Image (cartoon, rainbow, N blue to C red):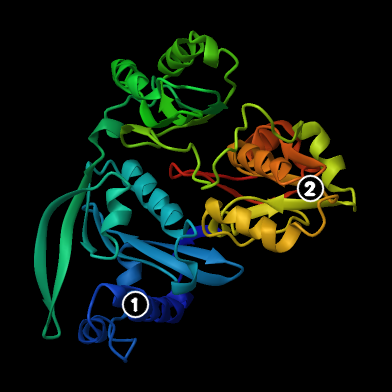
Amino acid sequence: MLIRLFQKQDSDRIAQLFHDTVREVNIRDYSPEQVKAWAPENIDFIDWSESCTKKFTYVAEEESEIIGFGQLEANGHIDCFFCHKDYQRCGVGTRLYRAIEAKALELRIERLFVEASITARAFFKNRGFTIIKEQQATFRGENFTNFVMEKSLKKYLAQNPEKSESCVVATFYHFVNLADYKSMRPTIIDFCNSHDLKGIILLAEEGINATIAGTRAGVDALLSYLRADPRLQNLEHKESYCDVMPCQKLRVRLKKELVKFGVSGIDPSKEVGVYVEPKDWNALIADPDVLVIDTRNVYEVEFGTFQGAIDPNLDFFYEFPKYVEAQLSANKQQKIAMFCTGGIRCEKASAYMLAQGFDEVYHLKGGILKYLAEVPPEESLWQGECFLFDDRIVTT
């Protein structure tokens, strides 16, 4: 996916994208009369070329098709922001927003604000915007509910670029019996807050799963604190770096499962498939007798995957058992190699498949992230990008 600035020849396609998105996506939150007023039959009711040229208009393009666009004005106002009807929940909006926020920081804009539709409200809220007020707007005789939302960028602008430290992002999980996981929550919250850490930590009886971001000292302190617990002393983590904090707040949640799977009695701390180091992964998936399966959700797969991998077309991970039953259970002697973003879903999936009687189940240790970090680009069999859940996308 390419994010670039608007060009005049984009005008017609942007007009059509706007019209189709309002008519087919926003229709779930607004009446037919409202969407017709919002996006009339005459798609040229706006001079799109002039409108887009006057603003910082960013375009998302995939294989020469425009799949989204967003506009930033010099005062920090985000105007039009739309994603193609066929590319919803695929990370297009995330990529566009990242470009807009980066430009705002470059321009030293202290505040971003937007009049978000009912449809877009959750998107902006998840990116740190707060609702200032709900309001009614009138357009072509129709009244529309929207929300004035804003996000302060002052904390980023206050940093001295010459002295600022890159933000460390640590991801980790560990399957282990944590019978006292509920009582662990308040102490972990206090520890993270005292070290100004942001991100999400999931605690369950079956273990811990987290993505946490902060300073080098803060992240190291948390890892040391967790590993001081004998049950977590073998916890492994992966790191990356970014210039801007990718997480807006700290969330420590109690869960029944670290990743929702819906099958009882599966315990990855006791039995999982064979771990495959990144350096050995290429040889394994090049074997014609090995069936390679991407266990991630469909919108993640669309960003990128391994050459020749099967996409089970999962909207949610808990659909994986149904896929196994329908597509794989007839041949349990088949060699299976699975992968996911960081490894946690594969551990659950491989434990399940072994319990179902599959003979040979392998999974990529550390997931895609470890593979991309350790395998040289010229040797990599990965194609595309890797979607993450904290507004970042790993490029290759």
Q: Secondary structure at mark 1?
A: helix
Please indicate whether residue 104 sits to the left or right of residue 61 in the image: left
Nearest-to-viewer mark from 2 and 1? 2
Q: Secondary structure at mark 2?
A: strand
> Quarter of the image holding residue 179?
top left
**257 to 72, vertically: above or below:** above
> Quarter of the image holding residue 328?
bottom right
- Looking at the rendered image, the quarter that the N terminus falls into is bottom right
Q: Position of residue 192 (x, y in %)?
A: 34, 20
Q: Disc 1 residue type? A: Trp
- Residue 100 in view of the camera: yes
- Residue 311 in view of the camera: no
In this view, the residue in front, 85 or 317, is 317
Q: Residue at x 30, y 74 (%)?
A: 28
Q: Position of residue 343 (x, y in %)?
A: 62, 37
Residue tagged 1: 48
Residue tagged 2: 336
Please indicate whether residue 101 sits to the left or right of residue 331 in the image: left
Q: Disc 2 residue type? A: Ile
> Alpha-carbon neighbours of circle 1 within 10 Å: few (<14), some, or many (≥20)?
some
> Quarter of the image holding residue 352?
top right
Q: Residue at x 77, y 51 (%)?
A: 292
Q: CA distance from mark 2 to mark 1?
A: 51 Å
In this view, the residue in front, 346 or 38, is 346
Please indicate whether residue 108 sits to the left or right of residue 331 in the image: left
Query: Which mark is on residue 5?
Result: none
Q: Position of residue 38 (x, y in %)?
A: 24, 80
Q: Residue furthest right?
A: 288
Work out whether mark 2 precedes mark 1 in sequence or the reverse, and give the earlier one: 1
- Looking at the rendered image, the quarter that the C terminus falls into is top right
